[in-house]
Image (cartoon, helix red, strand yellow):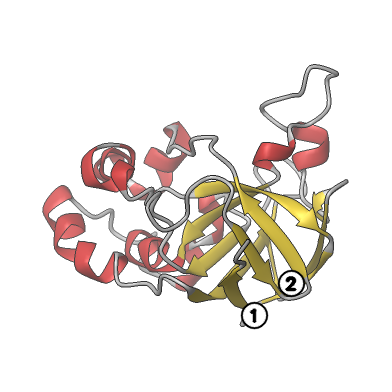
Amino acid sequence: MPKQLNKSELTASLPYMTSSPTDAGELKGIVIRPNIGERKEVDTVDISLERGVHGDRWLEHCWIFTEDGKSHPDVQICMMNARCIEVLAQQRDNWAPVGDNLFVDLDLSPENMPAGTQLQIGSAVIEITDTPHMGCAKFIERYGRDACIFVNTGIGKQLRLRGIYARVVQNGTISIGDKLTKIDH
């Protein structure tokens, strides 16, 4: 297991983490979580309004529900900046444990990706939601206490380095290497 970075190492990496493109990014990784604690990296996956990321446990094991007891669509897809997870994980095979579905080289800050922003990825369209995405005890176990504090507070929280949630607005297929492009309304 890679060494967990301390606060000063994380702070020194901030310029790299925040240098992602603002308008046209790239999908760098896709992870489905078939069951609690399981991760499977895939190169291509379908996403839909009904099922979120196909093969992911969102539909059966969501942590937030609508009034009628269904999995909440505002948390269908969790995504994280690829440069941030690259720094935290230190090895590519250590990205999946963070639990996000998509790793994107794109600025996810609220100024660049406010709730309601729509992104074209492959043949699909997703929309950023306003549900906060925070690191938890599992995040601390995998990447360290300093990393969790770093992404959950101060500049890390302001820039949403822990990531964001999105909902599907147009079914489609996405693949690693696909461009992420903002859709103008």
Residue matched to label 1:
178
In the image, 62 versus 166, the foreground residue is: 166
Residue at 44% across, 33% down? 136
User: Is 69 above or below relative to 143?
Assistant: above
Q: Is residue 177 left or right of residue 108?
A: right
Residue 166: percent from the left, percent from the top? 63, 49
What amino acid type should be assigned to the residue bearing mark 2? Ile
Residue at 27% across, 38% down? 149
Q: Secondary structure at mark 2?
A: strand
Residue 124: percent from the left, percent from the top? 76, 67
Which picture quadrant has residue 154? top left
Residue at 50% across, 62% down? 95
User: Is 174 above or below relative to 58?
Assistant: below
In the image, 142 versus 128, the foreground residue is: 128
In the image, 51 versus 9, the foreground residue is: 51
The quarter of the image holding the N terminus is bottom left
